[in-house]
Amino acid sequence: MSVLLASHINAVLTEAVSEEVGGRIFLEGADNEVQLPYIVYDYSVLSANATKDIIMCDTCDVNISIYDRDGVSSLELAEDVRHAFQDEATAEYPAYSVIDTEFGSYQGQLVDGIYIRTLRFTIKTQS
C-alpha cells in the first residue's frame, strides 16, 4: 500500500546515512532550527496500474532532499542515498511490497549558504 511507503523510505535512509544525519530524517518538512545535515522527503501516488499478471500496483514519485552547509559532504550523502535506493530496489513488508525502484533525476542548488541536493525516484508498490 503506497500510503505506507514512508516506512520503507525512512528505513532505507536510516540504514544508509544515520551516522551522518543521526535521526534528522523528516517527512515533508523540518523546522528552521534543525541541526545540519538533515534529510527531508515527500512522496505522492501518481497512478494505480495493473501489471501483466493483473496485479494492482501503485506508482509513486519520491523526492529526497539533503540539506548541508558543506557542498562536498552533501554530494557524498546524495550519492549514498542514490546507491541505497538502488540496492533496496525491492522490499517486503506485512501490508505491502516495494516491487521496483528507479532513479529519475538529481537537482542541486545553493540557498542562503545551504546546499540542497534533491534526488527523485519512482517507486512501485503492491498491496
Image (cartoon, rainbow, N blue to C red):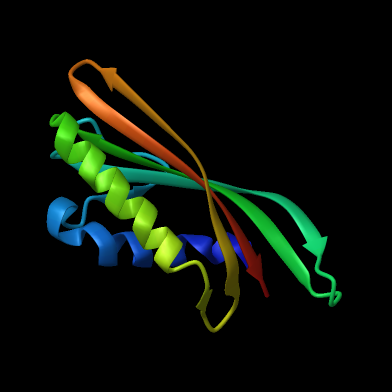
Quadrant where the N terminus lies? bottom right
Quadrant where the C terminus lies? bottom right
Measured from the top left, where is residue 29 in percent x and y?
37, 39
Q: Which of 78 and 36 is in front in this view?
A: 78
Above or below: residue 80 compared with residue 78: below
Q: Which of 27 and 120 is in front in this view?
A: 120
Q: Which of 43 and 82 is in front in this view?
A: 82
Measured from the top left, where is residue 85 in percent x and y?
42, 60
Identify the residue at horizontal 18%, vertical 30% (top origin). 71
Identify the residue at horizontal 27%, vertical 62% (top origin). 16
Q: Residue furthest top?
A: 112
Q: Quadrant of residue 114?
A: top left
Above or below: residue 37 compared with residue 56: above
Side (left or right) of 62 relative to 68: right
Above or below: residue 46 compared with residue 106: below
Side (left or right) of 103 relative to 65: right
